[in-house]
Amino acid sequence: MALRQMQLFDQSVSTLVEVDMDHELVQMEKLIDWDRLTWMAMDLRKKRVKAIAGKEPHYRELLGAVVLMAQRRVPYRVAADLIAYYAPARYLCNLMDSKWKIDPVTICEFTQMLGEEGMREINKYILEKAVAARYADPSFLLSDTTAQEAKIPYPTEVGLMGKYIKKVSGLVRKARGKFADVQKRVNKELSKVKGLIKRAHIFSKTKESKRKVAKKLFHIVKGVHKKLRKSVLSGKKLTGKASLELKRLTEVMEKLLPQMEHFIETGFVAAKKIIHLDMEKLYSIVRGKAGKSVEFGIKWGINRMKGGFIYGFLLGDGDHRSDKSFCMEAIRIHKKQFGKAPETYGYDRGGYSGLNIKRTKMAGVKNVGIAPTGKKAWEISDNLKKKVISERSQVEGAIGAIKNPIYGFNKPEARSKKAMIVYGHRGILGFNLRKLVKCELNLVGQQA
């Protein structure tokens, strides 16, 4: 084995690195009006923070961190490391001549402070820039819907009941004396619950055997819930994280237990079934796709302008609304974004109805390219119909692009529905930023 060559002096811990000016992160730093985004972030902070006290956040540097995380699906700690030691990321965050380091907790808190509204505002600015440079044409709009899947296990009755018992067992230990009776009941049933879960997963092979195990587990969970509900409603003042979480769990199980009982007895899933104990507002979205008939998460509407730039929106709670509702909401959102309705609008046959065609025209759309059902005629000319069909096919491509793991739109590392929405807008922002940089570089290349 060759010995390492001896050195007279230790290696230097500092280095001189020259960044490539064509690097996409460097290009983004030059394209973005950071002063505008800083004022936006300052206004949002005034709305969110009760009392403006302490040091001002490093807005410019933290906004750079948000843009970086829109381009890289990395945890906050990895993002902080990139900003500390990766030259293009330091350039993006305006830290090339600074020794200040961003803390991962600070990035997380700043992202939470911006929230959904902040991410939408940053994306709005990028879209306005693209329209001003004529990279995007807001007069030609296409829409579609997609599901943002949550990073959760497949929801089963046994899995949900097992998680409930596990959570209650841990929380009552932290809450201590207030829930002593519940703790005794859980400790008594815990080994039985584990045995039933093991039996359901390993030894139950038929639907009937699985149903019997689920039924036994359901009666145990119902008994624990009854005991817990009694403690929560006893009149004692609930303080502390564990106690408040137990109260929330009790409220969730009030809705979930009847839904579970309905499934165990009938074999049919109840309407608006709760599929996760921590994110109870997620939905099962029936898509009817080959190999994936159901997706678990939130339903989004995606608007794509001619040129390829996109933006997303939710309708209601992100549940499984009809495409007809999304069709009209897409036009309303576009009018709010750009001040007027598109001249041409396209949507698939899911949004077709006589009433929708009428409403779309009343909203100010001249050419309604909603695909008709059956053998009905299109509302537009054959030439325009071909353009709409061609552009409509590219909406699916854009949706597939934002679901690429690099952007973090699909199955984000989120523990709440609110966080999922923020990550969704951030993924769309990352897609638009990269597209804007490519458009700028292509323009420079053409001019050269």
Image (cartoon, grey):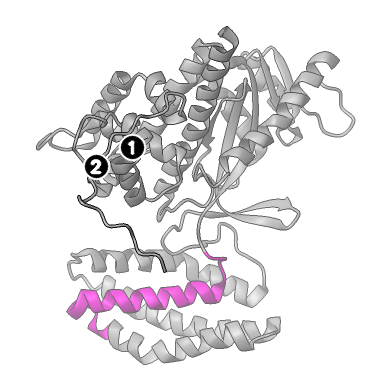
Residue at image location 27% in from the left, 71% down from the top: 232
Q: Residue at x 42, y 21 (%)?
A: 125
Marks 2 and 1 close (CB-CB < 8 Å): yes
Name the element at disc 1.
helix
Q: Kindly state the secondary structure of the residue where label 2 is placed.
A: loop
Residue 102 disc label? 2
Determine if the magenta segment contains residue 227.
Answer: no
- Across and down, in percent, residue 240 comes to 19, 65
Q: Which is more toward the observer, 423 or 273?
A: 423
213 to 266, vertically: above or below: below
* Residue 145, placed above or below residue 240: above
Q: Residue 117 lies in what quarter of the image?
A: top left
Q: What is the three-letter code of the residue carrying label 1?
A: Ala
Q: Which residues are magenta?
A: 153-181
Give percent across and percent down for residue 364. Answer: 62, 13
Q: Residue lying furthest left in this view?
A: 54
Q: Position of residue 380 (x, y in %)?
A: 79, 16
